[in-house]
Image (spheres, helix red, strand yellow):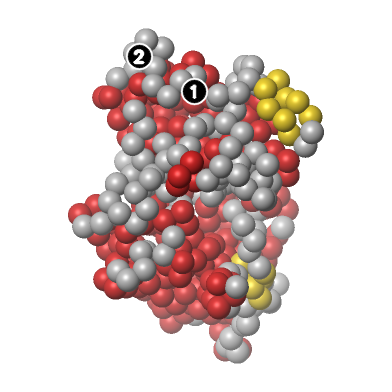
Amino acid sequence: MTIKTYTKSLLAASTLMVGFAGTAFADVAPEAVIKHYADIAQAKYEDSLATANALDAAIEAFLASPSEAGLQAVKEAWLAARVPYQQTEVYRFGNAIVDDWEGRVNAWPLDEGLIDYVDAGAYGDESDENTLYTANVIANPSITINGETIDASKITPELISETLQEAGGIEANVASGYHAIEFLLWGQDLNGNDAGAGNRPYTDFSLENCSNDHCDRRRQYLSAASDLLIADLEEMAANWQEGGAARKDLMDKGVSGGLVTILTGMGSLSYGELAGERMKLGLLLGDPEEEHDCFSDNTHNSHLYDAVGIRNAYLGTYDRVDGTQLTGPSLSELVASSAPDVDAELKADLDATVEAMEAMASRAETTEAYDQMIANGNAEGNATVQAAIDDLVKQTRSIERVIAALDLGSIELEGSDSLDNPGSVFQ
């Protein structure tokens, strides 16, 4: 998905400028803020790994004795695994090591026909842009990629990561990560903007009562994709430990570079990625295929925890999956020491965004799913989503004010045609 660079203008706020050379902050050192930001990253990726391991255990139990209850248990483990992971997305922008890696675990949308069977009536049977649109590796022990015949007789983590992921250089060929697993668990959501998520039968994984053929290979794929997700998360959790590559890269940037990294992640996720590409685009098009967790109808929670992650980065707090809370020196404290009005404004905006996301999530749980909310003509549902978008945009303006208050210069935040030039979406 193409995301255009969006250069934010900085506000003229000379009275709020804070220089780093020789300047003492009231109660918190910027170095401590940056270190704590890294500590929270480590905790979030460790929690993501722990919940992925729990998902893997549920998958193993299910494959040992497939049942409807067993498949539901795996789905619940997948949903639980999304909670800590989505809170890590604020680390993507500005941390190149994270952004370069992220596509392996959370890339979307995907042309799911690469992986397994699809409904041709809803999905189609070919694509001018993707020769592997319906390759269906689960059904085919060999496939052709760019004229080369590939042996896919055994589906392994290596086959998925080294051959199938972005096969042919096409980003839509997403073969690994949360969304590939999501598709295997739920199957296609064939309901459009009507009620209902994917409804894959558990017998798709049964050796004794196999539905839709190739159950042995579907089992291989699910197990291999889960193993690969764990390996990828192990890598990133290690990158944030003491001496890890991501932590070292952050610390090597110095104070100004570290603070720029934090704010780049907050502003880019808030504006271009979440408000724009993940929310406004789908709302403009009314297209259920533009929802983030499109097979499971879990998009409301993914958006909510992205917003929570942005707030975490500013407040220096994180609620761990074991029930404990991680707290420490925060960017909020740093800003408040010199620009309390700016700090108060951003904190209020962050809270308002989370509240709007919670209202959207509550509607999804009680009234209608996210893909129904964005349907053309659904005035109340559209308004619920738009309110969250508006709050994301507003909090991005406050993030700009923080950038100006800390005298960090010009920072490039991710933009989105859906926000900046919505007419182009329909061209």
Label drawn at residue 209: 2
Q: Residue at x 26, y 24 (%)?
A: 69
- Above or below, 5 against 262 in this view is below
Query: Disc 1 designates what residue?
Result: 218
Of the 4 image quadrants, the one containing the C terminus is bottom right
- Above or below, 346 against 61 in this view is below
Q: Residues within 10 Å of mark 2 (few under 14, many from 20)?
A: few
> Residue 38: image x %, image y %?
57, 49
Q: Is residue 49 visible?
A: no
Q: Residue at x 57, y 31 (%)?
A: 136
Q: Residue at x 42, y 48 (%)?
A: 294
> Residue 146: image x %, image y %?
77, 37
Q: Residue at x 41, y 12 (%)?
A: 207
Q: Secondary structure at mark 1?
A: helix
Identify which residue, 98 or 139, lies in the foreground.
139
Q: Three-letter amino acid code at disc 2?
A: Asn
Q: Three-letter amino acid code at disc 1?
A: Arg
Of the 4 image quadrants, the one containing the N terminus is bottom right
